[in-house]
Amino acid sequence: MNEQTSKYKPIGICPHCNHEVRAKISVKNNLRRDKCKCPNCGATIYVCRNYGCRNYAVGGDYYDDEFCPTCAKELMKFAGKFAEKSSGILLTALATAFSSFIVSKTKK
Ligand SMILES: [Zn+2]
Ligand SMILES: [Zn+2]
């Protein structure tokens, strides 16, 4: 468990310089994520929240990204696909409901 107490994170891609770096923990944070610093470009970075991802997310003064650029892109793609699909299902359901409504009306 010595790895846990070390001041360095596993190797991941820095979102600023796109280099594979072993980020140095600058502020240890048990409640939130550890604030890290890229040893290559010196930018503030955070570990990506996506499970199993070792890349780093952009850290800002007011807002820190939850995911690294790669995961963020994947999530956007996934969300877009899901939105497309669910709106399609919704339309089909509405159309079915509407046509059965018409049928019930005309039967009377
Ligand atoms: Zn960097
Ligand atoms: Zn990621």
Image (cartoon, rainbow, N blue to C red):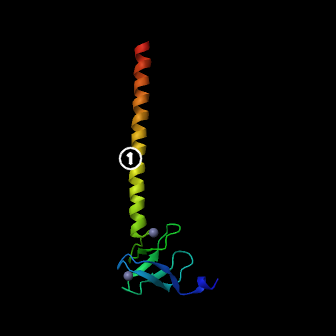
Q: Position of residue 16 (x, y in %)?
A: 35, 78
Q: Position of residue 44 (x, y in %)?
A: 41, 81
The kind of residue tagged 1 is Glu
Mark count: 1
Residue at image coords 41%, 34%: 92
Q: Quadrant of the N terminus?
A: bottom right
Q: Examine the rendered structure and indicate whether residue 83 appears above or below residue 70.
A: above
Q: Position of residue 71 (x, y in %)?
A: 43, 65
Q: From the viewer's side, name the closer residue of 58 and 8.
A: 8
Q: Examine the rendered structure and indicate whether residue 24 appears above or below residue 99.
A: below
Residue at image coords 36%, 77%: 18
Image quadrant assignment for residue 4: bottom right
Q: Examine the rendered structure and indicate whether residue 41 appears above or below residue 93.
A: below
Residue sitting farthest toward the top: 108
Image quadrant assignment for residue 108: top left
Q: Examine the rendered structure and indicate whether residue 103 appears above or below residue 84.
A: above
Mark 1 Cβ and ligand 2 under 8 Å apart: no
Q: Secondary structure at mark 1?
A: helix
Where in the image, quadrant-wise, is ligand 1 located? bottom left
Q: Is residue 78 left or right of residue 32?
A: left
Image quadrant assignment for residue 75: bottom left
Q: Residues within 10 Å of mark 1 (few under 14, many from 20)?
A: few
Q: Position of residue 99 (x, y in %)?
A: 40, 25
Would you name the residue on which mark 1 appears? 84
